[in-house]
Image: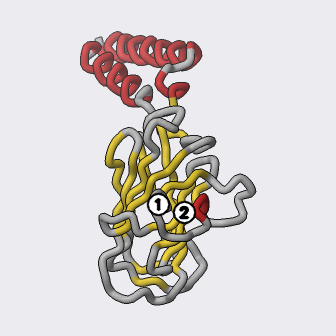
Amino acid sequence: MKKIIMETLVLAALAAGQAHAAPLSLEHASITATYNGSADLLGNDSGYLPGPGSNVSGLDPNDSYVEFLTGDALFGVDFTRSGLLSIYANMVPPPAGSYILTFDFGTSLAAPITSFTLVDASAVGGLPRLSVLSSHSIGLDLSGLEWNADFIPVSAQIGTADAAAEVPEPASAAVLLAGVAGLALSRRRKRAAQA
């Protein structure tokens, strides 16, 4: 019985020590974007004008403009320094169609992307499909969403492994050991009372 209790407690401690996601800083990020498989996303750095490299942008230093507009002007894409991505519909409802966006940060990130999670989809019916494509790129599919309002974003958080969450603090280990000792003592007393 002791062995089962110990194995259970060790597994619980290992599960608790697994990496948690933390917001990924996009400070100094250079973002290359695609829209439905082409470079038809216009970046803030190019003044939203089409041309070679117009699908590459950094963050707006004043955080007053979106970083990208789709070439058909249906969607605006905004990133924050803390890794929050917001998609705005400029026309509600957008015509039925395929709306797949990808964003590649290349080597400009301080840490690898490990998560991409939905924060708010209250402006739409349905859920966007979010994907971590690699340690430096993400994708989202807005196809089939029913937009209920314009200029209210769908938002998602880009995250990385929280290194601080991977190492249990010494106090956690002490509490775990105290719990194991308490269980063993309780079991011993119970057996003694039954004898």
Residue contact at pointers 1 and 2, CB within 8 angstroms: yes
The kind of secondary structure element at disc 1 is loop
Q: Residue 1: percent from the left, percent from the top?
A: 25, 17
The amino acid on which the numbered mark 1 sits, given as a three-letter code, is: Asn
Residue in the foreground of this view, choosing between 96 and 194:
96
Mark earlier in primary sequence (1, 2): 2
**Label disc, if present, on residue 55 of the rendered structure:** 1
**In the rendered image, the vertical position of residue 168 relative to residue 120, given as above or below:** above
Residue in the foreground of this view, choosing between 158 and 166:
158
**Marks 1 and 2, how far apart in space?**
5 Å
Tell me: 54 left or right of 114: right
Residue drawn 41% across the image and 23% down it: 13
The kind of secondary structure element at disc 2 is strand
Q: Residue 117: percent from the left, percent from the top?
A: 44, 54
Quarter of the image where the C terminus is located: top left
Disc 2 target residue: 43
Q: Residue 87: percent from the left, percent from the top?
A: 52, 69
Specify few, some or many for label 2: CA neighbours under 10 Å numbering under 14, 14-19, or 20 or more: many
**Label disc, if present, on residue 178 of the rendered structure:** none
Residue in the foreground of this view, choosing between 126 and 58:
58
Residue drawn 40% across the image and 83% down it: 146
